[in-house]
């Protein structure tokens, strides 16, 4: 496809069109200027003098690439021609003089003073004309030597500008083709700068709302943790009261029909019910003398509460916590990590139960939200 046909298929801004037309005009002027510098260089390099009568070429050993060598050779030839001319004039004068002496008086040419004056005047006029011609030739040669580097520099500059303009025109055409492909690949509606700014503002607003919601959830989780800690302390107090009551019951060893045991039993039952209602304790079971299983209800946004079982294992014949096992936390996605080990090392039973329930309830609140 011709460049003009490709260029007519796409339209740019008026400034681009103006620059493109200026580049094309400059290229056309450079092509039509008939600048013959490069051709003259090639002609000069390929130029040879005509062969002489013997068929020998006087410029066989001449290097046409160096103008200094050519100038020296021309100067030598001019000197030789001058000497040859002088010898010719000298021989001609001698010949005429000899002929005038040896010939008869009547046949000898008569040279008068007027003839000599005329000849001198003609020679003077010719010398003056030759001098003027030499001066004009020398001035012309000086101008050629002075202007030829400038002309060559301007020509190189015009040639480079023409090449650069052609490259820029080709880049403009390629850019327009790439832009057309992008427009075809990504049709309307395309994301513009105003739409992108509006989308950024919406995202910033959304991030701020999410940050506020996160802060609110963090405060709620902290409040729940504090409540769980209070409930754990109250549970420990109730356990101590239960132990005291059990020791009192064993010490009294009263019969079942004793009237004092019934109010105590009712108070213990009410205390256990209150503890269960506060901490959502679903079930407690002593599997052995050193193992206690506690099952709690966790609100996870479901119709029925989720059950989490915490198994506390103590060292035999001591009150030292040996291990803690949990079930039901995997469904909530709760990861305890080193939390259990840290509390087991310090024998913190209430703290480990409170920490596990806090993690589980925080995850449950997040799932429900």
Image (cartoon, helix red, strand yellow):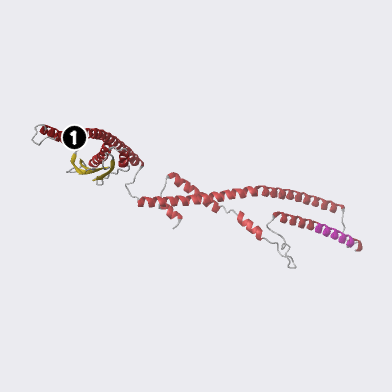
Nearest to the observer: residue 136 or residue 234 = 234
Which corner quadrant of the image does residue 312 belong to?
top left
Q: Is residue 107 left or right of residue 188?
A: right
The secondary structure type at the circle numbered 1 is helix
Q: Crowdedness of circle 1 by 10 Å Cα count: few (<14), some, many (20+)? A: few
In the image, residue 258 lies in the stretch drawn in magenta: no
Residue 145: give x, y in percent of width and height. Answer: 68, 49
Q: Quadrant of the N terminus?
A: bottom left
Occupied quadrant, residue 363 = top left
Q: Nearer the viewer, residue 258 or 308?
A: 258
Residue 358 rendering spot, x and y as whole percentages: 26, 38
Task: Give, as a single range, the part of the protein colored magenta.
Answer: 83-99
Residue at the spot of label 1:
247
Q: Is residue 96 magenta?
A: yes
State left or right for residue 23 relative to residue 271: right
Closer to us: 332 or 322:
322
Above or below residue 55? Residue 117 is above
Asked whether residue 24 is in view, the answer is: no
């Amino acid at each position: 496809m011709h460049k003009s046909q490709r260029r007519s298929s796409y339209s740019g801004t008026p400034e681009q069109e103006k620059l493109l037309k200026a580049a094309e005009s400059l290229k056309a002027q450079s092509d039509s200027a008939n600048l013959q510098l490069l051709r003259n260089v090639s002609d000069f390099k390929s130029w040879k003098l005509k062969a002489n009568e013997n068929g020998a070429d006087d410029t066989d050993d001449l290097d046409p690439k160096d103008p200094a060598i050519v100038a020296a050779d021309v100067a030598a030839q001019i000197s030789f021609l001058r000497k040859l001319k002088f010898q010719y004039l000298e021989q001609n004068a001698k010949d005429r003089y000899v002929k005038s002496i040896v010939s008869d008086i009547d046949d000898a040419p008569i040279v008068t003073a007027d003839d000599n004056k005329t000849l001198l005047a003609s020679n003077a006029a010719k010398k003056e004309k030759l001098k003027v011609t030499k001066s004009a030739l020398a001035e012309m040669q000086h101008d050629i030597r002075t202007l030829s580097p400038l002309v060559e520099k301007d020509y190189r500059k015009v040639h480079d500008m023409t090449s650069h303009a052609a490259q820029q025109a080709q880049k403009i055409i390629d850019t327009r083709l790439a832009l057309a492909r992008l427009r075809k690949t990504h049709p309307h509606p395309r994301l513009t700068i105003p739409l992108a700014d509006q989308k950024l503002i919406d995202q910033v607003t959304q991030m701020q709302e999410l940050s506020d919601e996160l802060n609110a959830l963090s405060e709620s989780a902290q409040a729940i943790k504090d409540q769980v800690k209070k409930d754990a302390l109250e549970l420990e107090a109730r356990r101590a009261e239960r132990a005291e009551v059990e020791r009192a019951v064993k010490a009294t060893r009263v019969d079942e029909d004793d009237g004092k045991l019934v109010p105590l039993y009712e108070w213990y039952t009410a205390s256990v019910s209150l503890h269960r209602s506060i901490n959502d304790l679903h079930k407690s079971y002593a599997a052995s003398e050193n193992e206690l299983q506690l099952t709690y209800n966790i609100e996870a946004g479901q119709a029925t509460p989720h059950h989490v079982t915490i198994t506390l294992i103590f060292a035999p014949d001591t009150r030292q916590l040996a291990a803690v096992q949990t079930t039901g936390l995997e469904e909530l996605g709760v990861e305890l990590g080193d939390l259990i080990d840290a509390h087991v090392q310090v024998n913190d039973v209430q703290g480990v139960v409170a920490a596990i329930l806090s993690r589980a309830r925080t995850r449950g609140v997040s799932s429900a939200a």
